[in-house]
Image (tube, rainbow, N blue to C red):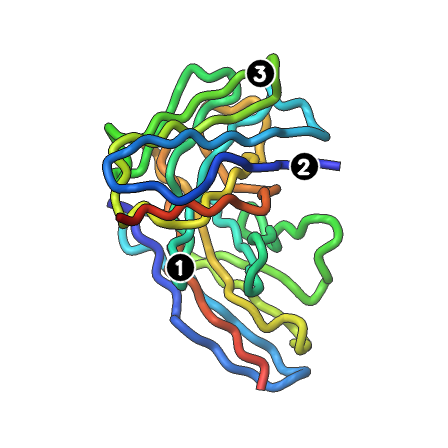
Amino acid sequence: SYELTQPPSVSVSPGQTARITCSAAALPKQYAYWYQQKPGQAPVLVIYKDSERPSGIPERFSGSSSGTTVTLTISGVQAEDEADYYCQSADSSGTVVFGGGTKLTVL
Amino acid sequence: QVQLVESGGGVVQPGVSLRLSCAASGFTFSNYGMHWVRQAPGKGLEWVAFIRYDGSNKYYADSVKGRFTISRDNSKNTLYLQMNSLRAEDTAVYYCAKDATDLVAAATGFDYWGQGTLVTVSS
């Protein structure tokens, strides 16, 4: 089955750049999506189709793809970016897969 | 603006059934596939089910296949999740989510989420 692997945690200081990776274990992935989730809140889409940013999402959020790995980059991290981040994709059989999530800590 | 409002959660005993609803507004509901996603307490997101925009195709996670049924009523802009034979491991917040791409047969991603409804399965 399709799996997406994320690091459990990433820590950065304010103003630094955070990079969160998401790797597909097997076949080349389809488009990836990234979600931010703060405690007690519903997830929010921050990147779609690997690298597109929805309206209203700050420019410091960006996405990239290389082979079977996608990366969410947050440039100039702010305290408000502290949250859990999930990558997600869909396989060719029509099912959806999430990565295990990465807790971003702003030191 | 897009709104997704879930209802129907609660505390139930193992083995019973429950039906969740999701009232959608602010977009052309009949043009978009819809999903249910759940999150157990302190855990990550788990996709549960997807239904194509016209209801003709449905997909399920292995963990709920044969027990849960996703459906929709495009005349009422409402999504449903019928949950049968509930187990303790089904305890979670259940989110309704809108697919990001219109008029496609398969799932892509989620651009809007509801606030969720809590289902607790406990004796």
**Which amino acid, mark 3?**
Asn
x and y, in percent, of residue B14 in the image:
25, 41
With B70 as the anchor, is B84 left or right in this view? Answer: left
The earlier-in-sequence mark between 2 and 1 is 2
Q: Read off the chain for label 1.
A: B
Cα separation, mark 3 vs mark 2, equals 15 Å
x and y, in percent, of residue A91 in the image:
36, 39
x and y, in percent, of residue B45 in the image:
42, 53
x and y, in percent, of residue A83 in the image:
56, 68
Cα separation, mark 2 vs mark 1, equals 24 Å
- Residue receiving disc 1: B41
- Residue receiving disc 2: B3
Q: Is mark 1 on a helix, strand or loop?
A: loop
Mark 2, other Cα within 10 Å: few <14 / some 14–19 / many ≥20: some
The earlier-in-sequence mark between 3 and 1 is 1
- Residue receiving disc 3: B74
What's the residue at 54%, 55% (across, down)?
A35
Q: Quadrant of residue A73?
A: bottom right
Front disc: 2 or 1: 1
Give whichever of A44, B88 is nearer the camera. B88
**Which amino acid, mark 2?**
Gln
Cα separation, mark 3 vs mark 1, equals 32 Å
Say above or below: B9 vs A100.
Answer: above
With B3 as the anchor, is A43 left or right in this view? Answer: left
What's the residue at 40%, 59% (across, down)?
B41
What's the residue at 62%, 61% (across, down)?
A62
